Amino acid sequence: MISVLLLFCSAFLAATILPFYSEVLLFALLRQGHDPHLLFWVATFGNTLGSVVNWWMGRYLLRFQHRAWFYFSPTQIAKAQAWFQRYGVWTLLLAWLPIGGDPLTLVAGIMNVRFKVFIVLVAVGKGLRYVAVIWFSAWW
């Protein structure tokens, strides 16, 4: 049970803006014979919940843009918003990508994407990624 909790934490952290990866732990647990269905749901839920943190931060991030410690420049924010407006909400299916996926969920919060739409698209994309890891583990 500890290993499942570690997978949840790993998946959660991997979805935040922290550099973390959950696929390696998932693969190892699958190779040890853990239930793939349980691991799929735990990893998908943890990873999606981490993205919700990014979405929530994005919703309130711009309130602090005039503070000295604020990390993003107005130009960076404008570029991200323009990119998201151009490609749309469907890009959230790519939130699982190791590069660009986490900032995408943050921008979705900034752009006030409806929470229900956000959850569905992000969960589907992240779930498909874990299906691929499980399939690869079974094939290996």
Image (cartoon, rainbow, N blue to C red):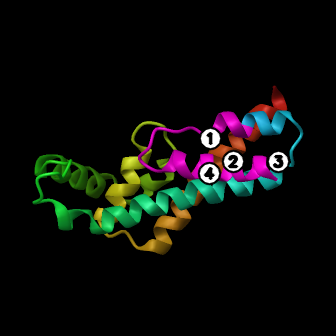
Tell me whether circle 4 and circle 2 mark residues in contact (CB < 8 Å): yes
Q: Residue at x 11, y 53 (%)?
A: 68
Q: Which residue is mark 1?
A: 22
At mark 3, the secondary structure is helix
Q: Mark on residue 9?
A: 4
Q: CA distance from mark 1 to mark 3?
A: 14 Å
Q: Mark on residue 36?
A: 3
Q: Is residue 86 above or below residue 28?
A: below
Tell me whether circle 2 and circle 1 mark residues in contact (CB < 8 Å): yes
Which residue is nearer to you in this view: 136 or 46?
46
Residue 3 position in % (x across, y down): 77, 46
Q: Residue furthest top?
A: 140
Q: Is residue 17 magenta?
A: yes
Residue 47 position in % (x across, y down): 58, 53
Q: CA distance from mark 3 to mark 4?
A: 17 Å
Tell me whether circle 2 and circle 3 mark residues in contact (CB < 8 Å): no
Q: Is residue 45 above or below residue 23?
A: below
At mark 4, the secondary structure is helix
**As drawn, is 60 to the left or to the right of 117?**
left
Mark 2 or mark 3: whose residue is earlier in sequence: 2
Q: Which residue is mark 2?
A: 7
Q: Residue at x 32, y 56 (%)?
A: 107
Mark 2 or mark 1: whose residue is earlier in sequence: 2
Mark 1 or mark 3: whose residue is earlier in sequence: 1
**As drawn, is 64 to the left or to the right of 112?**
left
Identify which amino acid the numbered label 2 is placed on.
Leu
Identify which amino acid the numbered label 3 is placed on.
Pro
